Image (cartoon, rainbow, N blue to C red):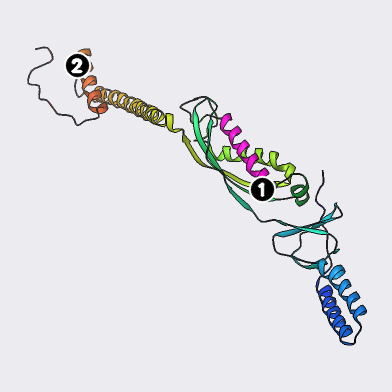
Amino acid sequence: MQTEKVTTAPSGYLAFILVLVLIGAAAAAFYWQQPVVGAIICVVNFVFILPGLAIVNPNESKVLTLFGKYQGTVKQDGFFWVNPFTVKKKVSLKAYNLNGQQLKVNDSVGNPIEIAAVIVWQIKDTAKAVFAVENYLQYVNIQSEAAVRHLANSFPYDHIEDENASITLRGGSEQVGILLVQELNERLERAGIEVLEARISHLAYAPEIAHAMLQRQQASAIISARRLIVEGAVGMVEMALQKMEEKNIIELDEERKAAMVSNLLVVLCGDKSVSPIVNTGTLYH
């Protein structure tokens, strides 16, 4: 596989001055009735000198090939003169931003989801980008889609689907981004492309299960909240009974303790305002 070879080209300003001088010499030859000399000067100027001039802008490069053989890459920006018979292909070294389309795939437990990613990449090896693949832009698009699909198939959407999962697509965005960058760099190394950053830009359940999954998430949240409320209420009741016993405020038998515990739990765990009821009798009448 062809690897990049950075080359340094001579300055193009001297060649440009020579072009101007030869143009003046050709004009003088035609003026002095020397058409053959003028024609020779024009051929030398426009065939052997002028085509060799090349401008390289910042964050761009020129890949040079001579009769089908790779000669090197000019990465330094400026005005240069190279072999006039070389083919000069411009390759941008700027960072590209790929906003991937939304893909419908299954996560690791089989739930259909929609996922998309934003990928920032740039060309690291110009020779591989030009010679190793047919079209490096298309290559990046296809391989990025394949990497996102593989990533979605490797992890569950959320912990609700797999409580034992260490990484989920929804909760582990940082780890998922790092893994996506690693996989993309492995896939795009053949084309001499380096991925700088990759992030999940869209993540949702597929429309056909979105409503059911939303209800499931709400139910799970309610159960978790109720569990926390009950645990707190039991602790408060236990603390209240201990304080009353320590300070000898009142002595309660088992039946009265049960009644107090029941009342406190109703007050603390209820989701509506409590309406007090005055009991003028006793628990035994």
Q: Which residues are magenta?
A: 136-154
Q: Would residue 154 appear left or right of 279 to someone viewing this image?
A: right
Distance from Cα at disc 2 to Cα at disc 1: 78 Å
Residue 234 percent across, percent down from the top left: 31, 23
Query: Badge 1: how crowded within 10 Å, few (<14), some, or many (20+)?
Result: few
Mark 2 belongs to which amino acid?
Arg
Mark 1 belongs to which amino acid?
Leu
Q: Quadrant of the C terminus?
A: top left
Q: Depth check: 122 or 141 in front?
A: 141
Q: Depth check: 158 or 7 in front?
A: 7
Q: Which residue, given by chain and number where applicable, does mark 1 sit on?
A: 137
Q: Would residue 7 appear left or right of 143 to someone viewing this image?
A: right
Residue 153 in magenta stretch: yes
Which of the two discs, 2 and 1, labels the residue nearer the N terminus?
1
Looking at the image, which residue is at 23% across and 20% down? Answer: 262
Residue 89 percent across, percent down from the top left: 76, 57
Residue 147 percent across, percent down from the top left: 62, 37
Q: Depth check: 117 or 66 in front?
A: 66
Q: Would residue 147 appear left or right of 200 to someone viewing this image?
A: right
Q: Which residue, given by chain and number where applicable, does mark 2 sit on?
A: 256
Q: Secondary structure at mark 2?
A: helix
Residue 103's image quarter? top right
Query: Badge 2: how crowded within 10 Å, few (<14), some, or many (20+)?
Result: few
Q: Depth check: 278 or 23 in front?
A: 23
Above or below — where is 12 with respect to 131? below
Query: Contact, CB < 8 Å: mark 2 with mark 1?
Result: no
Above or below — where is 194 with respect to 278? below
Q: Main secondary structure of the magenta part?
A: helix
Looking at the image, which residue is at 75% across and 49% down? Answer: 130
